[in-house]
Image (tube, coloured by chain):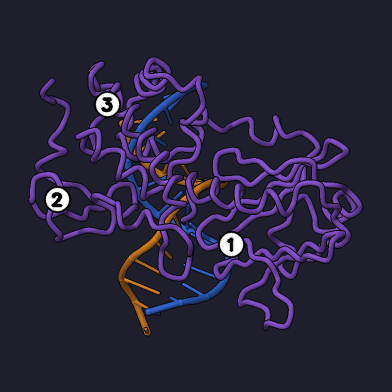
Chain colours: A purple, B orange, C blue
Amino acid sequence: MPELPEVETIVRTCRPRLVGRRIVAFHSRWRKNVAPTLPAARRAIVGRRITALTRRAKFIVFRLDDGGCLLVHLRMSGRLEWAKNGLPEPRHVRATWDLDDGQRLLFCDARKFGRILYTRDLAAATADLGPEPLERGFTPAKLGHLLQQRRRQLKPLLLDQSVIAGLGNIYTDEALFLAGLHPTIRSDALNETNIRRLHQAIRDVLRLAIRQHGTSLDWIYPGGWMQERLLVYGRAGEPCRRCGTPIVALRIAQRGTHICPRCQNGVAQRG
DNA sequence: TGAATTGTTATCGT
DNA sequence: AACGATAACAATTC
């Protein structure tokens, strides 16, 4: 559930408390989700200093002072929290990091789908991720190329992390609405105007969501207020904010999908 | 109780 | 063979 804006928010929030700190202990109560293995990861990171905290796609990247990297993927229900003195531990703690200043970082994950991965080679570990949609190199021409290379339905293609990195179900639905495009349009059917609009829509919705610190979703992700600004996601039956037509819920590629049937009427767009 | 939830990967079909 | 669609899976909440 945490997508690019939520992960970016977490990274920005945790960065000042993590960068410069040394890891003095690492434990996991769910060794299955630690790669390559829990003992190997512990050996590699304990004693190392964190030199930077960054994001790649939906991965949180701890850069360490010996060149190694620890990647954390939250998947559906993962969270990072700080242990608080005197308070009971939160539920579903799966892993913990103790730092040299006494802080303890917790990885909580009700559904245990999250992953922790140690690697010495960040480039190799992230080799099959597509471009970052907010980086300079992500131009309309680049997006057009990615779309026209394939003949897939638009929504599954946008969700594919090897095509574009960081979009999930919420922001894909929002971007398609903003661009006025139906999620099942074939990717190679878009004209230049469609592509330009989709490019703008993806960047606009991600930047807005980051400004809002992400979308708070029941017990999964707290803290953001983008849910107030969503135009289609989770609004089935409610009136489209643009035209008043009730938002419709569909199932596309096994994913809950939300559209305005009037505003997202296919390829032929005015302008 | 079972439906819903999502990113990734394995598998099936064209 | 390569690609795209689909199924399966992880495990929990409500």
Numbered disc 2: what chain?
A: A
| Of the image marks 1 and 2, the number of the one nearer the N terminus | 1
Q: Position of residue A246 (x, y in %)?
A: 10, 55
Report the residue marked by disc 3.
A197
Mark 1, other Cα within 10 Å: few <14 / some 14–19 / many ≥20 = many
Identity of the amino acid at label 3?
A: Arg
Q: Is residue A82 left or right of residue C10?
A: right
Q: Nearer the viewer, residue A9 or A234?
A: A9
In what element is the residue under mark 2?
A: loop
Q: Nearer the viewer, residue A167 or A227?
A: A227
The structure residue drawn at horizontal position 72% and vertical position 49%, both measured from the top left corner, is: A117
CA gap, disc 3 and disc 2: 19 Å
CA gap, disc 1 and disc 2: 32 Å
In what element is the residue under mark 3?
A: helix
In what element is the residue under mark 1?
A: strand
| Of the image marks 3 and 2, the number of the one nearer the N terminus | 3
Assess whether mark 2 and mark 1 are in contact (beta carbons under 8 angstroms).
no
Numbered disc 3: what chain?
A: A
| Of the image marks 3 and 1, the number of the one nearer the N terminus | 1
Q: Nearer the viewer, residue A20 or A145?
A: A20
Q: Quadrant of the C terminus of chain A?
A: top left
The structure residue drawn at horizontal position 52% and vertical position 63%, both measured from the top left corner, is: A77
Q: Is residue A47 left or right of residue C3?
A: right
Report the residue marked by disc 1.
A79
Report the residue marked by disc 2.
A240
**Residue A123 lies in quadrant:** top right
Q: Position of residue A145 (x, y in %)?
A: 39, 17
Mark 2, other Cα within 10 Å: few <14 / some 14–19 / many ≥20 = many
The structure residue drawn at horizontal position 68% and vertical position 82%, both measured from the top left corner, is: A87
